[in-house]
Amino acid sequence: MIETLPRRVNGDEALVRRGRFLTTTFLLEVGATAWLISIFEGRIVSVARGPFVMPSSSFALRAPEEEWRKFWSSKPPPGSNDVMALIKRRVLKAEGDLQVFMANLRYFKEALAKLRAEGATEGGEA
Amino acid sequence: MSARFEPIVGRYMHLDLFGRKHRIYVEQAGEGTPLLCLHTAGADGRQYRALMNDERITQRHRVIAFDMPWHGKSSPPSGWHDEEYRLTSAQYTTMILEIMTALELDRPILIGCSIGGRIALHLALEQPERFRAIIGLQAGAHVDPYYDLNFLHRPDVHGGEVSAAIVSGLVGPDAPDQERWETLWHYMQGGPGVFKGDLHFYKLDGDIRGRVAQIDTRRCPLFLLSGEYDYSCTPEETLAVAKSVAGSEAAIMKGLGHFPMSENPAEFFKYLLPVLDKIGATESMMAAK
């Protein structure tokens, strides 16, 4: 599913425009599986699946698979409907240079929510 | 299509607060029992626009909302440019009571959301005789910081963008887009460091866990309404307050988030109107005695 991120993000013109000053690589951990996601000027240019020997990234988002599964459900329950909700419940760890993450927080929230079951409502996405 | 005016009227009030001159924006609509509205951290009185535009409320209530100093159309006091804004419980309480006095409000109903809900608990405890009833929206006794607040005010992160992005998930999933984004727009418009300064009260200074059980609802009825999707002040935290305050009434609002009056007024009114009816009925009963 993560592999579909480029199509889902790059197909949203407004989201790409909001990310036009964003070029970075971040690490996404879904349980034991790691993904390196590279963004160039708002477009997702590569999604690579680990394991990695020496992954370089600006920051990492790490949460158990079960938490991401709830977050990516078509209508996430309270407490799973937003990245900040996961952080509040201490189940998502955001680590590294978080300036990039926070300066583009709306972009990252919306990009990650793109992985919700297609046709999902926008609730809690943005 | 012809122009249409809302019944809301806004004015600027000059008032001394904490020994300093302030210029404060106040708006109101309706006639009857005063209903004083307190906005959330980093936002302003526009959050109550729907209450001021609904005749079911304005026929019997004078709905009043002010923008706190530094917020909305209220100015920061002279000298602000060299200060760090930090809201305290004492300032917040003083501000509300002084504004009530200035507006000659006789025992208003107080409704406050988030930081407004928290200070409502402080006032229920410390000033119950000043209010005929208190309605706390998203009111909890304390919230632990769950992100680095410094990100809200630093030159390499846009304050308005990040403030709105921080709170965006606090809007419930069923909110109509127009109201969702109006609510977030208010956050995007906040002045530098203002949201952060409000959170000083919310997350550090305004902790009332140790005293909340002392609220006496016989002196002032307390109603607590919280949105199901609020992860800042969770339903559990509101219910914990309700459990520790004898005589308080609490309801968890399905599908709503942290900004019920602004994000989804139609759904919110299903919970608010019965509370206002109940307060009105109690008042009538007392008057008849």
Image (cartoon, coloured by chain):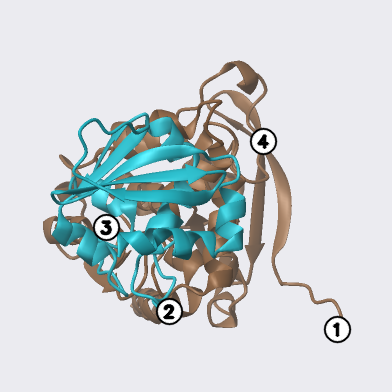
Chain colours: A cyan, B brown
Circle 2 residue: B267
In the rendered view, tell whether residue B184 sits above or below residue A61.
Answer: below
- Residue B24 located left or right of residue B288: right
- Residue under mark 1: which chain is it in? B
Rendering coords of residue A123 (x, y %): 41, 70
Circle 3 residue: B219
- Residue under mark 4: which chain is it in? B
- The numbered mark, 1 or 4, whose residue comes first in the sequence reads 1
Is the Cβ of the residue at disc 3 closer than 8 Å to that at disc 4? no
- The numbered mark, 3 or 4, whose residue comes first in the sequence reads 4
Rendering coords of residue A87 (x, y %): 26, 46
Circle 1 residue: B1
Q: How far apart, in angstroms, are the residues tagged by discs 1 and 2?
A: 28 Å
Q: Secondary structure at mark 3?
A: loop
Q: Secondary structure at mark 1?
A: loop
Looking at the rendered structure, whether the residues under marks 4 and 2 are on a common chain is answered as: yes
Q: Residue placed at 48% from the left, 60% from the top?
A: A9
